[in-house]
Image (cartoon, grey):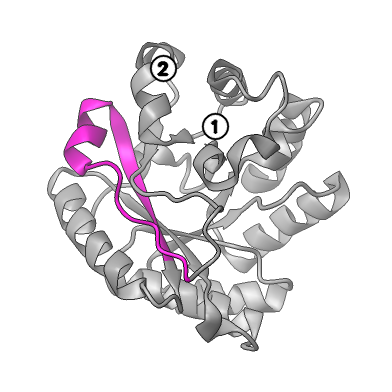
Amino acid sequence: MVSLKKITTKGKAMFLAYDQGIEHGPVDFNDKNVDPDYIIKIAREGKYNAVIFQKGIAEKYKKEIKKSKVPLILKLNGKTNLYKGEPVSKQLCTVKEALSLGAVAVGYTIYIGSKYENIMLQEFEAIQKRAHKSGLPVIAWIYPRGKSVKGKSKAELIAYSARVGLEIGADIVKLNYPGSLQDLKWAVRSAGKTKIVIAGGIKKDEKNLLQNVRNAMRAGAVGLAIGRNVWQAKKPLEITKKIRKIVWG
């Protein structure tokens, strides 16, 4: 089994996610957080286990990332939100490129329930095989999307996502918070020995955010991959400190 020691501390993790630019466009950014250097600084000073970038930022800010000593998780696929049909997120970067950029783990999004889920599952299989041969952990972002999931229970879909992660060989699965502690516990159990991190998701008020983090840790998740709720905050290091206290106790 691939070791997760480079991206965890005492078996737990906080990842600073900044792969949203391709997915959401510039709507997420302001004059400060539009600058990747600002994100790298938060990741370094906040002592995050890793920062998550797409290929372009990892290439152009390679020197700054290396100097920060924050481990890099490289996202290998992506799509814009402009096309509104059945979602598909195809590979944009290889494991070989990830290694050359100094990544210590790679990530890939799969939209289960999409008409094109088979394409993403097949791409993931090849990535997982290549990454594991190189000693890199693989993180699967798994989100139920598309016409096929409409009307289905959110809790069941999140548990299904967790199980898919286990079945396809992901080392960590990134999930959206399902809405309740009990539902998240079932998702964590469904993932077996595959670890779970919870997505920070859309900007929330601090009280709700911290409660979600508490529930995630109570449910057995190993931590979270959080972006907008940190780098959109007025005081990102203060919210980071509060999250760290919950994750590590």
| Sequence-first tag of 2 and 1 | 1
- For this view, does 76 lie left or right of residue 143? left
Q: What is the secondary structure assignment of the residue under circle 1?
A: loop
- For this view, does 213 lie left or right of residue 37? right
* Type of amino acid at the residue the image marks with label 2: Tyr
Residue located 47% across and 71% down the image: 86
Depth check: give the residue in front, 164 or 88. 88
Depth check: give the residue in front, 90 or 173. 90
Q: Comparing marks 2 and 1, which lies closer to the viewer?
A: 2
Quarter of the image with the N terminus is: bottom left
**Residue 105 magenta:** yes
How far apart marks 2 and 1 lie (CA) works out to 17 Å
* Residue at image mark 1: 48
Residue 209 in view (yes/no): yes
**Magenta part of the chain:** 86-110
Q: Is residue 191 above or below residue 95?
A: below
Q: Is residue 169 above or below residue 245?
A: below
* Type of amino acid at the residue the image marks with label 1: Tyr
Depth check: give the residue in front, 123 or 173. 123
- What is the number of the mark on residue 69? none
Q: Local crowd at mark 1 within 10 Å, few (<14), some, or many (≥20)?
A: many
- For this view, does 240 lie left or right of residue 156? right
**Residue 96 magenta:** yes
Q: Local crowd at mark 2 within 10 Å, few (<14), some, or many (≥20)?
A: some
Q: What is the secondary structure assignment of the residue under circle 2?
A: loop
Quarter of the image with the C terminus is: top right
Residue located 40% across and 63% down the image: 88
* Residue at image mark 2: 61
